[in-house]
Image (spheres, rainbow, N blue to C red):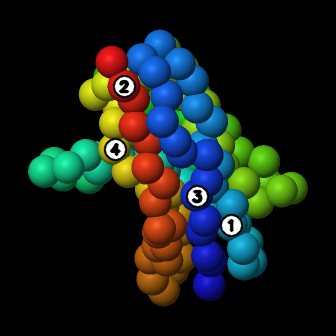
Amino acid sequence: QVQLVESGGGLVQAGGSLRLSCAASGSFFSLYAVGWYRQAPGKQRELVAAITSGGNANYEDSVKGRFTISRDNAENRVYLQMNSLKPEDTAVYYCNAVRDTAWARQEYWGQGTQVTVSS
């Protein structure tokens, strides 16, 4: 069992930066792939950035060059550094951890943190 808690959201002006943190409790977090998703009002939840257990990162096109995902397995944390924020980045951001075993997929979500970018 893994519990995820996001933090670091807030209100920022366009062009500013925020650093989101996803803190995990439970066992074997380092074995999980972790993704940051976001959901804006009236829109579907979308994957923004993901990092594998081995540290390989991928990004949605609109955030490439602006967002950086990283993980600290010793601290059981995954971060999302967001720079050059735009109003369209406004959303609730969620942390997701997933691991496939021979028996089942294990997947967990955090409660989300609000990011609001003013123009």
Helix, strand or loop under label 2: strand
Marks 3 and 2 in Cβ contact (< 8 Å): no
Q: Which residue is mark 2?
A: 118
Marks 3 and 1 in Cβ contact (< 8 Å): no
In the depicted structure, whether residue 5 falls above or below residue 115: below
User: Badge 2 local density, few (<14 within 10 Å), some, or many (20+)?
Assistant: some
Q: Is residue 25 left or right of residue 41?
A: right
Give the distance between the C-alpha atoms of the residues marked 1 and 2, in whole angstroms. 30 Å
Give the distance between the C-alpha atoms of the residues marked 4 and 3, in whole angstroms. 14 Å
Helix, strand or loop under label 4: strand
Q: Residue at 61% of width from left, 65% of height from top?
A: 5
Ranked by sequence position, the earlier of labels 4 and 3 is 3
Q: Residue at 13% of width from left, 51% of height from top?
A: 42
Tag nearer the camera, 3 or 1: 3
Q: Which residue is mark 1?
A: 24
Give the distance between the C-alpha atoms of the residues marked 1 and 4, in whole angstroms. 21 Å
> Residue 7's x, y, as percent?
61, 53
Tag nearer the camera, 4 or 2: 2
> Residue 65's x, y, as percent?
49, 15
Kind of residue indicated by mark 2: Ser
Q: Residue at 46% of width from left, 60% of height from top?
A: 112
Q: Residue furthest left?
A: 42
Ranked by sequence position, the earlier of labels 4 and 2 is 4
Q: Residue furthest right?
A: 74
Helix, strand or loop under label 1: strand
Residue 6, numbered label: 3
Residue 47, numbered label: none
